[in-house]
Image: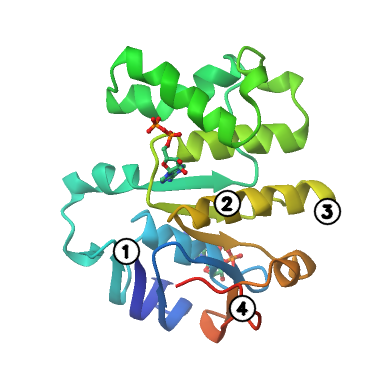
Amino acid sequence: MIEFRQVTKRYDSDHTALAQVNFLIHRGEMVFLTGHSGAGKSTLLKLIMVMERPTAGEVIVGGQRLNQLPRRQIPYLRRHIGVVFQNHQLLFDRTVFDNVAMPLEVMGVPHRDIGRRVRAALDKVGLLRKEKMNPMQLSGGEQQRVGIARAVVNKPPVLLADEPTGNLDPELSADIMNLFARFSQVGVTVLIASHDIALVKAMDRRVLTLDHGRLVTSAPVSSGASHG
Ligand code: ADP
Ligand code: ADP
């Protein structure tokens, strides 16, 4: 579902953010991306979203070679990729429901379908009863779950998360990770950048580790809980 072939990214001629990175993530797999600050995690996610282009090598998402993707196709690709950020980027001038509905509004989904889709997404994150609230009234963990509902509301086959538990305590962080695991169980390919080593270990999934732009491990999980 997500493949990197000899991918190198330089932002300027002397600084290499990613160097010859190779990996393959299968459909329905849940994989973590770790590494120190500056190791290249965000860059790797941006290449998948085509927010950046590789300097060399090839990124393939859902069978699409992104190098060959014309600029005008980028918005369509992005509809197939749900993204969750650390600071969830919710809008506080509208309800939980309206925040989650935003991607569907942008896509021009008919109004009668929006209510059903938004409630299905809120149900999946356990927030159905809070749809009329303002996100400001919610706890940090609940706000992050609204962000996840928004990311999955159009059922993207790929879900990316950049430090999704960065602001949460360990218990809430585990809840969020278990939520991601449930999406992978229904076939969503999930890639989560996190430097929370303890949490990543506890989840017992494949881990891609970056060190100064190089992929140093791509260890498979040890237990029988592997996917793909
Ligand atoms: P991480 O997410 O692991 O902290 P990043 O992908 O953000 O790492 O950064 C990798 C390297 O690329 C860092 O050295 C960073 O300074 C550099 N970098 C990231 N974005 C840019 C940019 N837009 N322009 C120049 N350098 C950048
Ligand atoms: P409907 O399509 O009627 O709105 P749902 O939104 O509940 O119904 O989704 C139907 C099924 O699709 C769910 O059981 C869910 O597990 C699955 N599914 C497939 N891909 C995704 C995704 N990216 N996010 C959430 N659910 C998904």
Q: Amino acid at mark 3?
A: Pro
User: Which sits in the foreground, 162 or 203?
Assistant: 203
Q: Amino acid at mark 4?
A: Gly
Measuring from the top left, give residue 198's x and y in whole percent: 79, 69
Of discs 2 and 4, which sits in the foreground? 4
Choose top left, top right, bottom left or bottom right for residue 225: bottom right
Crowd band around label 4 with a 10 angstrom C-alpha radius: few (<14), some (14–19), many (20+): few
Disc 2 versus disc 4: distance between alpha carbons? Answer: 17 Å
Disc 1 versus disc 3: distance between alpha carbons? Answer: 35 Å
Labels 2 & 1 near each other (Cβ < 8 A): no
Q: Which residue in the structure is indicated by mark 3?
A: 170
Of discs 1 and 3, which sits in the foreground? 3
Q: Quadrant where the N terminus lies?
A: bottom left
Measuring from the top left, give residue 32's x and y in whole percent: 59, 68
Residue 214 to residue 40: above or below:
below
Q: Which residue in the structure is indicated by mark 1?
A: 53
Of discs 4 and 3, which sits in the foreground? 4
Labels 4 & 3 near each other (Cβ < 8 A): no
> Which image quarter has ligand 2?
top left
Disc 1 versus disc 4: distance between alpha carbons? Answer: 36 Å
Disc 3 versus disc 2: distance between alpha carbons? Answer: 19 Å
> SS at mark 4?
loop
Among the two numbered marks 4 and 3 on one chain, the one whose residue lies closer to the N terminus? 3
Q: Say which residue appears at 62% left-offset and 12% top-offset.
A: 132
Measuring from the top left, give residue 49's x and y in whole percent: 37, 54
Q: Quadrant where the C terminus lies?
A: bottom left
Crowd band around label 3 with a 10 angstrom C-alpha radius: few (<14), some (14–19), many (20+): some
Among the two numbered marks 3 and 2 on one chain, the one whose residue lies closer to the N terminus? 3
Of discs 1 and 4, which sits in the foreground? 4
Labels 1 & 3 near each other (Cβ < 8 A): no
Among the two numbered marks 2 and 4 on one chain, the one whose residue lies closer to the N terminus? 2
Q: Amino acid at mark 1?
A: Arg
